[in-house]
Image (cartoon, helix red, strand yellow):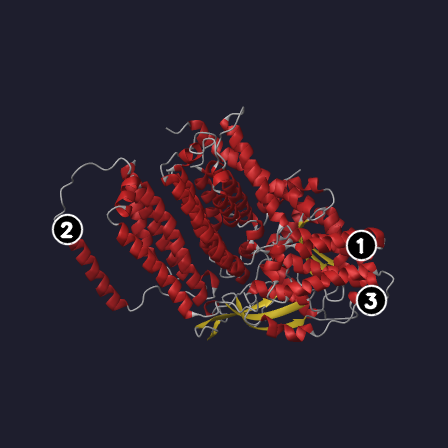
Amino acid sequence: MTPVWTVVALPVALGVLTLLAASGNAVLGAAASGAPAPLRHWDDPLRAAARALVQQRRRTFAADRLLSRVGVVTLPVAALLAAVVLPLGTRAVADWSVGVVWFNAMEVATWAAVWLTGWGPNSAYALVGGYRYLAQGLAYELPHMFALITVALGAGSLNVTRVADAQDGLWFGVWMPVAFAVYLVSALAMAFWGPLAHPVADDVASGAAVELDGPDRLVFAVGRYALLVVAAAAAVPFFLGGGAGPWLPAPVWTLVKTLVVLGALLWAGHRLPVLRMDRFLEFAWIVLIPASLLQMLVVALVVLD
Amino acid sequence: MGLTAYAAGRPSALLVGVPGAAAVRLAAEAEVRRLGWASASSPASASVLVVCGDPGPSLAAAIDAAWNGVPSPRADVRLSSPGTVRAALADVPATLADLPGQRASAVTGSWRPPAAAEPEHGHGHHMTGAVHGLAMAERADDRDGLKLDVLHLPFGPVLPYWPDGLQIRMAVQGDVVQSAEAAFLDPSGPDFWDEPGARRRAAAHLDALARLLGVAGWRAQAERARLLRDAALDGTPAATLLPRATRFARRVARSRTLRWMTDGLGVHARLLARLDATTTALAHLDDPEPLPPEPDVLGVLPSLLAGRDLAAARLIVAALDPRP
Amino acid sequence: MQVAAFWALAVTAVASGVAVFRVDSMARATFALLASFLCVGGLLLLLDLHYLGALVVLMMIMEMLVMAVFMVMYMMNPAGLMPMTMIHNGRWALGISVAVFAALAAGIVLTPWPPRRGAPPDDPTYALGEAIMGPKMLVMMGIGLAILATMIGSVVLSTDRGRYDREDPR
């Protein structure tokens, strides 16, 4: 039975971490670009949110508002639904037997979200951005799935809590380093973040998001940060032993590990230029897929033995 | 403090450069950085439109189209000289927080789609379609022997990390450029970068590098290039300037990801050459030579863009960095 | 509760299936179809077939979005700017679909369904894995390889240089 506290704790934790990620990113970005007094930028996301809330709504000509609205709203909803299978310490809101597959399915819903956001406004840059996300999806999704399957194989279960428990003593991140690395790349890709932000890159004036204003822009931005948080949080049960750790209770360890992964993802966002999709696609299919398959083979041999 | 005033305290600025008036844009960029404002990448994400210079008629029309896409509360700042920048931008938060004034302008400034006969300009809406009394996308032969829709897409002049006043009209199929025409809108007067001096020359290269790095999606280093550019023009002594520039150049040149994304297009070689030219100019600050005139890159640009996808095309434009 | 969920999903699935042919834009038709499939995925989840349900959600989203790639390729007018009918060859299509529906419905009614033996397995996911990877393994592997080879082969044969020009000799 699902403990009631998790149902309350999950959205609260996701909301707080999302705000923290946005705020931390504003400071990191200012510091990385040598801006004066980077710390004063901590409330940039709040000001952007205020701006979005008081803004007049503009619409482009002959837009498909229904589809773009559906796309924008799907983003945070997918992030929340993906998070329900992640254990907050030891208990998940939904302790489903196929949690790993569910997480994967919800994260694929962002394909639809970003593409619809790009298609809806009837703007060429937005469409190109949405189109790029599909190419990105085709690039990262297979290696990502193989990484998740490898984890499930190592644990002998598709249940996320059992995956976390199976790493008693030795984290999957340690003995499946290739799968972990592939997962981190795909975490950036699913939140179209940092080097994998090609769908919303500056060369097409922020791509899929180019026409978003008012509450739409806010919901899209919240969804994107929430996805980044969920991607970071999922690395904890998959690769970093879940809530296991000395002295502190499991929820605290989960939080600490999540923050470390999240910080690393945010930091990577300012360290690297954006990857162009034609080149990344090639890399993903020629390097990442064979590498993740080999990793799976190794894990399968160890498990069978 | 209400939400409107809170948001107005640090607005999001979209800067539009005017050919020849780089001095104004440089001053505006520095002021926006000092105030800690966000930099917008499209009209929809902006709350302030900052026009840096006095645009000619066709550039002004493009700017008006972009202004139409800026949602209220919004402010429109027209700057004609670097000296007016600070005072003009200081007024912006008050304008944005002035609700009665904003309501009045929001009603008058409602969104009107451009008519069919009007040339497409501004920032890339493709607003066509026989259905709405406008022309549809045409069909043309694709390079793979298919007949596919072709879309005429104007790039610039209101676009982040884009040369001031440049407009390139591209015919695209999917995201592949089929053909392109490049022109500067209302080029006028002597260029800011044509003045002699090694500082001016180094700053011109750094300005171009900032655009290239921005297009490559590396905002942090693009900002660093701008900081160095401003320092070079400020008269910062060479003893402090040169080590900073060398560090920056080494960092950018060493990035393997950047090399991976830009080689094979001729872009990476140009990037390295520019980095080199920058540090050389800063090492010889007493050299009075002006920036050598660029060869006619505008003329060769269309042939270089054909067959590229949009991301590569933008990198090529930024690497060549045409000047009027 | 379960009955209400079943009817809600079933009605939505059929309604969005109908919508596929009533809307006038390719994008809306695609996503109406996706909504219909997602409802079917929900029905599978309702049957406690968790793995199959999640898989249907996952695969259908990916499939429909791959369709969107072709949509952009063939029609560069975003937002369904050009209203277009989703029905072609109306009279024949109607005849064929009525005939197919009648045949399938007759099949359901006339088939002598075997009486139920045994109980549902404790873990349907495990049972499914056993079935696919046990007696049917050779077939499944064969189909998988054939599909992959077809995809790669058709792409390689259709273009020798890829979508974009490249100067680099890699």
**A169 in relation to C70, above or below:** above
Residue position marked by numbered label 2 in the rendering: C109
Structural crowding at the residue carrying mark 1, measured as other residues with C-alpha within 10 Å and reported as few (<14), some (14–19) or many (≥20)? many
Q: Are marks 2 and 1 on the same chain?
A: no
Residue position marked by numbered label 3 in the rendering: B195
Residue A285 point in image, percent of width and height: 47, 57
Residue C152 point in image, percent of width and height: 39, 62
Residue C55 point in image, percent of width and height: 35, 47
Query: Is residue A67 in sight in this rendering?
Result: yes
Specify the quadrant that holds the N terminus of chain B: top right
Chain ID of residue with mark 3: B
Structural crowding at the residue carrying mark 2, measured as other residues with C-alpha within 10 Å and reported as few (<14), some (14–19) or many (≥20)? few
- Label 2, label 1: how far apart the Cα atoms are: 86 Å
Q: Are marks 3 and 1 on the same chain?
A: yes
Residue position marked by numbered label 1 in the rendering: B242
- Label 3, label 1: how far apart the Cα atoms are: 21 Å
Q: Residue at x 14, y 47 (%)?
A: C113
Residue A82 point in image, percent of width and height: 44, 41
Q: What is the three-letter code of the residue carrying label 1? A: Leu
**A76 in relation to A275, above or below:** above
Q: Are marks 2 and 3 on the same chain?
A: no
- Of circles 3 and 1, which is in front? 1
- Relative horizontal placement of residue A261, taking residue C118 as reference (left or right): right
What secondary structure is marked by label 2? helix
Q: Quadrant of residue B24?
A: bottom right
Q: Are marks 2 and 3 in contact (CB under 8 Å)?
A: no
Q: Quadrant of residue C168?
A: bottom right
Q: What is the three-letter code of the residue carrying label 2? A: Val
- Relative horizontal placement of residue A31, taking residue A147 as reference (left or right): right
- Label 2, label 3: how far apart the Cα atoms are: 89 Å
Chain ID of residue with mark 1: B
